Image: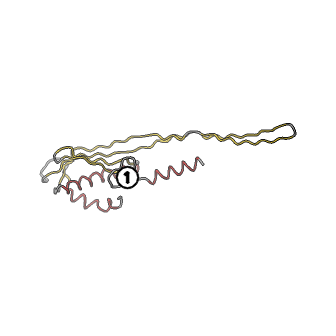
Amino acid sequence: MKNALILLFILFLCGCSVRYTERVPGIQPGYVDSQLGQDTYQVKIGEAWQKDWADLEKFALYRASEITKSKNRRYFLILNSSTQISTNYLTIPSSTTTNSTASVSGSTAYISSTSTSTPSVTAPISGGWYTLDFRVLANADATGKVVDAQQIIHDYQIFIDSRR
């Protein structure tokens, strides 16, 4: 029974993946964005399993492009980007099951018992966040890592649609 629960839990973890959607804390991984200043924003996307880390940057760039487009602008400047990884540990405690039988023969009672122990298991679960700070630009004349929001939306549209 315990092995079946472990298998179900592992299958649950494998089936979870970050989607391109707004984050619902504790329920749905996704993006969170905030305005840091005039025309300056931060997009965080995460609570992702290791298998999804490669997609986090694409999601962040796409979200930054949506914000840029909503401001009727075409370009944004990447100010900073970073990845944060945290590891938590899940422990399934040990258990012992004892089966006993008793029988009576005359005035003597016989008891037989068997105990089976399962050791505890601890497994690491790693989650990641990708953070992108950017400034929406009036035009593409700025120096630095300028990104064309229209091009990102065009290039990533099919990928994002498959992850909604």
Amino acid tagged 1: Val
In the visual, does 34 lie left or right of 121?
A: left
How many marks are shown on the rendered structure?
A: 1
Q: Please tell me whether residue 112 is drawn above or below residue 39 in the rendered image.
A: above
Q: Which quadrant is home to the C terminus?
A: bottom left
Residue 136: give x, y in percent of width and height. Answer: 17, 50
Residue positioned most to the top = 108
Q: Which residue is mark 1?
A: 18
Which class describes the residues within 10 Å of circle 1: few (<14), some (14-19), or many (20+)? Answer: many
| Label 1 secondary element | loop
Residue 13: give x, y in percent of width and height. Answer: 46, 50
Residue 7: give x, y in percent of width and height. Answer: 54, 50
Residue 68: give x, y in percent of width and height. Answer: 20, 54
In the visual, does 103 lie left or right of 130?
A: right
Q: Residue at x 32, y 43 (%)?
A: 83
Its colouring scheme is secondary structure
In the visual, does 70 lie left or right of 90?
A: left
In the depicted view, which residue is nearer to us: 32 or 56? Answer: 32
Q: Residue at x 77, y 39 (%)?
A: 111
Q: Residue at x 25, y 62 (%)?
A: 154
Residue positioned most to the front = 107
Image quadrant assignment for residue 129 = top left
